[in-house]
Amino acid sequence: MTKIRVALVTGGSRGLGAEISRQLVQEGLRVLVAARNVDRADEVSRSLGAQAVPLSLDVASPDSVTAAVEYAITRMGRIDVLINNAGVALDGAQRAIGVDYRLLDTTLLTNLIGPWRMADAVVPHMVRNGYGRIVNVTSNLGSLAGMTQGQEPAYRVSKAALNALTRILAADLVGTGVLVNAASPGWIRTAMGGAKARRSVEQGADTPVWLATLSEGNETTGGLFYDREPLPW
Ligand SMILES: NC(=O)c1ccc[n+]([C@@H]2O[C@H](COP(=O)([O-])OP(=O)(O)OC[C@H]3O[C@@H](n4cnc5c(N)ncnc54)[C@H](OP(=O)(O)O)[C@@H]3O)[C@@H](O)[C@H]2O)c1
């Protein structure tokens, strides 16, 4: 009998995470739609049918991460896919010098340490099962290749560090069946991206979902992708 894979999508309550959840259900996975606003996560889950389940999760809280992952494994029996999608972009027009350290803390806690803790909580379980797909949702703004002066230093540093974490985790997990990749969605029409963004959530979700469903035996790991094509770090 074919196993039904289970995915946990952080920040599934709206925007890109809600669309990633929808596409994963369409691909035949069961999906835990995780966010701080569990009412919104519940709405998204209901719209996706019986294969989706809401999950209360604050990636910035160690206790919340532990409780959510324990609940998810107890309720679903397994976690095969982790989509580290939850993120914040708070520092707008700020520059590196004179940055607001409260915003910097929250940004790093949510965009870097949150995904790190999530991976820490699910990887031992995935390794025991000999199968896992971790997708870190990053941004072109985090690519060192294009890093110049400018705005959003906290956000850009958080995504550059998330890219580094992607490579480190991928290297640590070679041979375990757990693949770790980063996906850059492009500029997407969401609460974060705004109405003027050029791309739809459907376009942005496609590459994370592709990486989340890489077939058994596929060895793609430690990569950064945009529209399913490799992107320079
Ligand atoms: N939109 C773009 O143009 C764009 C471009 C490049 C990269 N990205 C990346 O794509 C990802 C999704 O962005 P989006 O545009 O969909 O943003 P969004 O519409 O603002 O949604 C962000 C999601 O993250 C959740 N979230 C925020 N903080 C959280 C926390 N501490 N714990 C758990 N969930 C949390 C939010 O739900 P709650 O508030 O209910 O927790 C929400 O579901 C982010 O990582 C972002 O950096 C977006």
Image (cartoon, helix red, strand yellow):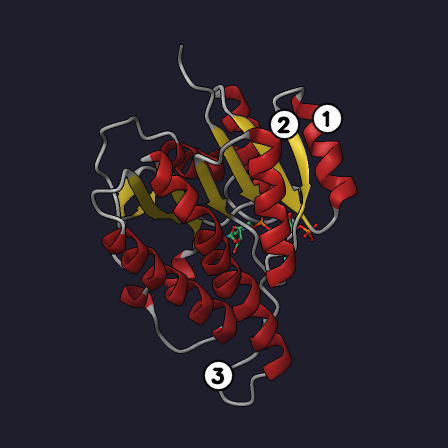
In the image: residue 96, left or right of residue 130: right
Residue at 48%, 75% (x, y): give it: 153
- Which label is found at residue 52? 2
Secondary element at image label 3: loop
Q: Is mark 3 within 8 Å of ligand 1?
A: no
Residue closest to the far right: 39
For the residue pair 130 and 157, the one nearer the viewer reads as 130
| Residue 148 at x, y percent in the picture | 35, 74
Q: Quadrant of the N terminus?
A: top left
The residue drawn where x is 48% and y is 52% is 121
CA gap between label 2 and label 1 equals 7 Å
Whether the residues at callouts 2 and 1 have beta carbons within 8 Å, the answer is yes
Quarter of the rendering containing residue 147: bottom left
Question: For this view, does 33 lie left or right of residue 225?
Answer: right
Q: Amino acid at mark 1?
A: Arg
Residue in the picture at 40% in, 35% down: 212
Please, what secondary structure does the residue beneath circle 1 have? helix
Question: Dot 1, how many residues are within 10 Å of its Cα: few (below 14), some (14-19), or many (20+)?
Answer: some
Question: Label 2: how many residues lie within 10 Å, few (<14), some (14-19) or many (20+)?
Answer: many
**Which circle's residue, 2 or 1, is located before the other in the chain?**
1
Spatial CA distance of label 3 from label 1 is 42 Å
**Image position, residue 222 (x, y; %):** 26, 50
Image coordinates of residue 41 in percent, x first then y, are 70, 39
Q: Which residue is mark 1?
A: 46
Q: Is residue 189 visible?
A: no
